Image (cartoon, rainbow, N blue to C red):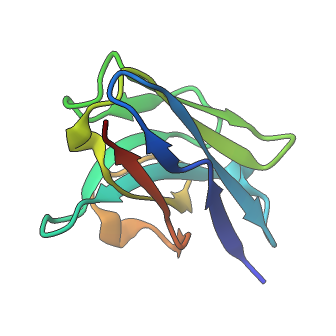
Amino acid sequence: QLQLVESGGGLVQPGGSLRLSCAASGFRSDSYAIGWFRQAPGKEREGVSCISFSGGSTNYADSVKGRFTISRDNAKNTVYLQMNRLKPEDTAIYSCAARRYYCAGYASSYTYWGQGTQVTVSS
């Protein structure tokens, strides 16, 4: 069964850090780009970051540049999102998704999706 499973979410104070993981099972993720998306209550889903199949290309939303870092370990079939200097506006459900080879900005082009993990930034 092909699936993506996110982990690492939780409650953190403003200025804190979290590392999210996206583990793939049932398929080799090393031929897939992995994107992270988030959706806050009452807001549309937005793309946060993406990494190409080889890890050679990454991109970030302007709102997280300089604070978030995406990386991948293809030997472990896992992609990570390191989130530093978190802000209350980063509060959302974070989901990872996979599409062949290269990143794209539109969520509908991603084939596989995880269930999501809640990130709450609050004092």
- In this view, 111 is above or below 33: below
Residue at the (61%, 59%) spot, across then down = 6
Q: Residue furthest top?
A: 66
Q: Does 33 sit left or right of 89 as displayed?
A: right
Q: Quadrant of the C terminus?
A: top left
Residue 105 seen in this snapshot:
no
Residue at the (24%, 60%) spot, across then down = 40
Q: Which percent across, then down, holds residue 16?
A: 43, 25
- The image shows a total of numbered marks equal to 0
Q: Residue furthest bottom?
A: 1
**Quarter of the rendering containing residue 7:** bottom right
Residue in the foreground of this view, choosing between 121 and 72: 121
Residue 44 seen in this snapshot:
yes
Q: Quadrant of the N terminus?
A: bottom right
Residue at the (49%, 27%) spot, across then down = 17
Q: Which percent across, then down, holds residue 33?
A: 55, 49
Q: Residue furthest right?
A: 75
Q: Does 2 sit left or right of 60 as displayed?
A: right
Q: Which percent across, then down, holds residue 55?
A: 61, 31
Q: Which percent across, then down, holds residue 51?
A: 51, 38
Residue at the (20%, 67%) spot, across then down = 41
- In this view, 52 is above or below 82: below
- In this view, 106 is above or below 16: below
